[in-house]
Image (tube, grey):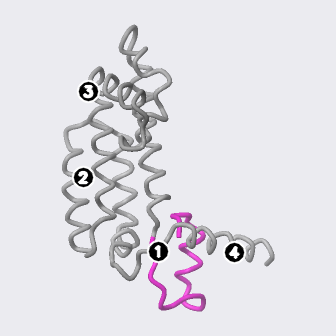
Amino acid sequence: MDMWKPFRASTLKAEHAPHAAILFDTFHVLRHLGAALDTVRKTEYARLTGKGRHCIKGQKSTLLSHRENLTTDGRRSLKLLLKANKRLRTAYILKEEFGQLWDYEREGWARRFFEHWRAALKWQRLKPYEKFAEMIDRHGDGIAAYCKPENKVALGFVEGVNSKIRVIQRCS
């Protein structure tokens, strides 16, 4: 499920799904990380003037994309942007590294990876990332549980179930 509080609260009620394991899917988690990166981009744009500001303008989609999904021009733009702004480079690298979390097949390894990733934030002064890390910490069980091979579920299936839940909620 996504991290919407009513979904979680409804699932946790004893009469609804007492034996259910809550799994938070990658799309919804990474959407929050993308929002944190975009906040860093906006902050840097507001902080800078001149050429540094010019490099950031219009680069939202470039920053939010994975490098392998970019065109040649996109990669060139990303390289220039990351060379021009240290804080955005750090935020981008942290975003890309966080994607490794979903490759783990054991909860303990995923939790250890997250703790190391969070430790890398310590001196970076990236408040949006610190807020993201706090959110991940609060939802850690549902994220770590996703790492078990039997819990890896396709996002389309998850979205279909979420849509049906919303329809049921509207009908009642």
Mark carried by residue 164: 4
- Nearest the eye: 130 or 44: 44
Q: Position of residue 15 (x, y in %)?
A: 59, 91
Which residue is denoted by mark 1 in the rendering? 153
Furthest residue toward right: 171
N-terminal of the pair, mark 2 or mark 1, is 2
Q: Which residue is mark 2?
A: 118
Q: CA distance from mark 2 to mark 3?
A: 19 Å
Nearest the viewer among 118 and 71 is: 71
Element under disc 4? helix
Q: Are marks 2 and 1 in contact (CB under 8 Å)?
A: no
Query: Residue shown at 46%/50% (left/top)?
Result: 32
Question: Which label belongs to residue 36?
Answer: none
Q: Quadrant of residue 125?
A: top left
Q: CA distance from mark 4 to mark 2?
A: 35 Å
Assess whether mark 3 and mark 2 are in contact (beta carbons under 8 angstroms): no
Disc ID at residue 86: 3
Q: Which residues are magenta?
A: 1-23
Secondary structure at numbered mark 2? helix
Tell me where residue 44 appears, x and y as whole percent: 39, 24
Q: Is residue 59 left or right of residue 76?
A: right
